[in-house]
Image (spheres, grey):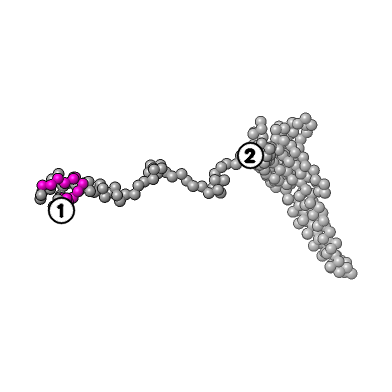
Amino acid sequence: MYCGNCGADIPAHLRFCTACGAQTDNEETRVATEETRVAVNTPPRPALERADVPAAPRWTPQEATRAVPLRRTADEPEEERVIFTVRPTFLFVGLGYGLAALGAILITVLLAVFVKQLPAYYALPVALLLLLIPAFKHLKRNALKYTLTDSKIEIDEGLFSRRTRNVPLRNIQDVTVAASLTQRVLGFGDLLIDNASELGGSTLMRNIPKPRRHAELILRELRRWH
């Protein structure tokens, strides 16, 4: 390219003539100058950075521990899952407490009316002795517990000395619900569990509330073993 003022040769990247200093309006000069300015002002991109690849997430030690699933070792025992725990119905115990309280009141009134020589505060402890009967029944009820897990039926019984009997589910053949008319009206019954072990025999769960519901839960677990 040549200068329009003096005719001197001007390189393409220059906008002024080196001989006379006149400004040129060449399109090639403007494009070359713009590319040079952009190249100078743009910072270089790191060699390892790529715009189309997302950066790897940074995990804290706590998050990394939660992300890795824990595996049960061979020596660690598998924890049993408890399906239900039930005791005999509280109906008889509650009825006994009510009758004992009523009897205590009647004895106190009768002693106060017919035996006037005996003060009322002496008659009350004698009447309260009736509460010992339902209290003993209450202790016996709490001493008996039936627990169903995903592998066995566990029976804990004993008031002073405890005894635990386990019936594996794989040895159970059938579960029978037995309820009299009174038991059906009051909402409890008995469960008869047939045991097919070498010793044979059966297990009776007496006075269980909602016996059909508990029998269904036992049969559901038996299907996993048969």
Tag 2 near tag 1, CB within 8 Å: no
| Residues at marks 2 and 1, CA–CA distance in whole angstroms | 85 Å
Which residue is rendered at x = 64% and y = 37% of the image? Answer: 220
Q: Would you place residue 206 above or below residue 199 in this image?
A: below
Q: Nearer the viewer, residue 218 or 190?
A: 218
Judged left or right of residue 91, residue 71 is left
Amino acid type at image mark 2: Arg
Please tell me whether the stretch drawn in magenta is mainly helix, strand or loop. Answer: loop
Q: Nearer the viewer, residue 214 or 93?
A: 214
Query: Circle 1 sits on which residue?
Result: 21
Query: Circle 2 sits on which residue?
Result: 72
> Which disc number belongs to residue 51?
none
- Residue 14 in the magenta stretch? The answer is yes
User: Which stretch is magenta?
Assistant: 7-18
The quadrant in which the C terminus is found is top right
Dot 2 alpha-carbon crowd within 10 angstroms: few under 14, some 14 to 19, many 20 or more: few
Place residue 135 in its image quadrant: bottom right
The quadrant in which the N terminus is found is top left
Which residue is rendered at x = 82% and y = 60% of the image? Answer: 128
Q: Earlier in the sequence, mark 2 or mark 1?
A: 1
Judged left or right of residue 19, residue 176 is right
Q: Is residue 196 visible?
A: yes
Local secondary structure at mark 1: loop
**Image location (x, y in percent) of residue 75:** 68, 38
Amino acid type at image mark 1: Gly
**Image location (x, y in percent) of residue 35:** 25, 47
